[in-house]
Amino acid sequence: VTAAESYNVTSITDGGIGNYTINYTKAFSGNKYVAVATTDGVTRISSLSAASAVVLVTAFEGSSVDATIVCFVAFGDFA
């Protein structure tokens, strides 16, 4: 998994089918920030920490699927 643009993203970890962890270069001050993700499937952010966020993608019937593209943005205060 490769980021097309990596503003404050160190890496994206492929945690299995439909499971992506976005790891930040500079941590947020805590887990109280706004994150938005969109894909070509059903998308949800399953967890937020100061250093990363986990995005899960499923098909409309509920099974996990790999996304063709994942768009992600986060806004908050840095540590």
Image (cartoon, rainbow, N blue to C red):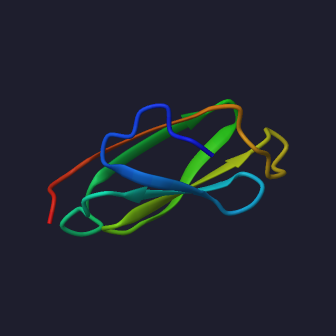
| Residue 24 placement, left or right of 62 | left
Residue 79: name its quadrant.
Answer: bottom left
Number of residue marks: 0
Residue at left offset 50%, top offset 39%: 3
Residue at left offset 32%, top offset 40%: 7
Residue at left offset 63%, top offset 32%: 69
Residue 22 location (% of width, % of height): 48, 55
Residue 14 location (% of width, % of height): 66, 57
Between 10 and 17, the one lying in front of the other is 10
| Residue 6 placement, left or right of 2 | left
Residue 75 location (% of width, % of height): 25, 45
Between 28 and 14, the one lying in front of the other is 14
| Residue 11 placement, left or right of 24 | right
| Residue 22 placement, left or right of 17 | left
Residue 40 location (% of width, % of height): 68, 30
31 over 44 or under it: above or below: below
Residue at left offset 79%, top offset 52%: 64
